[in-house]
Image: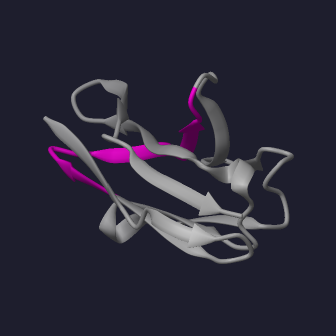
Amino acid sequence: QVQLVESGGGLVQAGGSLRLSCAASGSIFSINRMGWYRQAPGKQRELVASSGGSTNYADSVKGRFTISRDNAKNTVYLQMNTLKPEDTAVYYCNAFVVTDTMRSYWGQGTQVTVSS
């Protein structure tokens, strides 16, 4: 069984910063792609950033957010700078994990609220 546990969300003023963390644990052989998604009220879940063979960002966060990984710790981070009210959402960690098979796992989500 694999678990993804997120931390680092909270309330911040516009222009501020937050750093999200997501640690994977369990019977992990390896982790391929890891990424962050977000879902605002009334909207679909969207990709924010991913790190696998390449690094990808949503246009709305380019230049402000940075994704990084610590493979030794099976952990992915999302450094969020110059936050805007429109960044308010529940942020979810996602990972493609190889155990005896390969499948996608999701974290429970962490709330990020940016006040104007």
Q: Residue 44 lies in magenta, yes or no?
A: no
Can you see residue 55?
no
Q: Please state if 79 lies on the left or on the right of 91 as rendered.
A: right
Residue at left offset 35%, top offset 26%? 102
Give the x, y percent position of residue 29: 26, 45
Q: Please state if 29 lies on the left or on the right of 22 as rendered.
A: left
Q: Is residue 31 above or below residue 9?
A: above
Of 56 and 97, the residue lying toward us: 56
In the picture, residue 70 is in which quadrant? bottom left
Of 112 and 116, the residue lying toward us: 116
Give the x, y percent position of residue 39: 56, 34
Give the x, y percent position of residue 88: 61, 50
Give the x, y percent position of residue 73: 31, 68
Of 97 and 24, the residue lying toward us: 24
- Range of residues picked out in magenta: 23-41
In the picture, residue 93 is in which quadrant? top left
Residue lying furthest bottom: 16
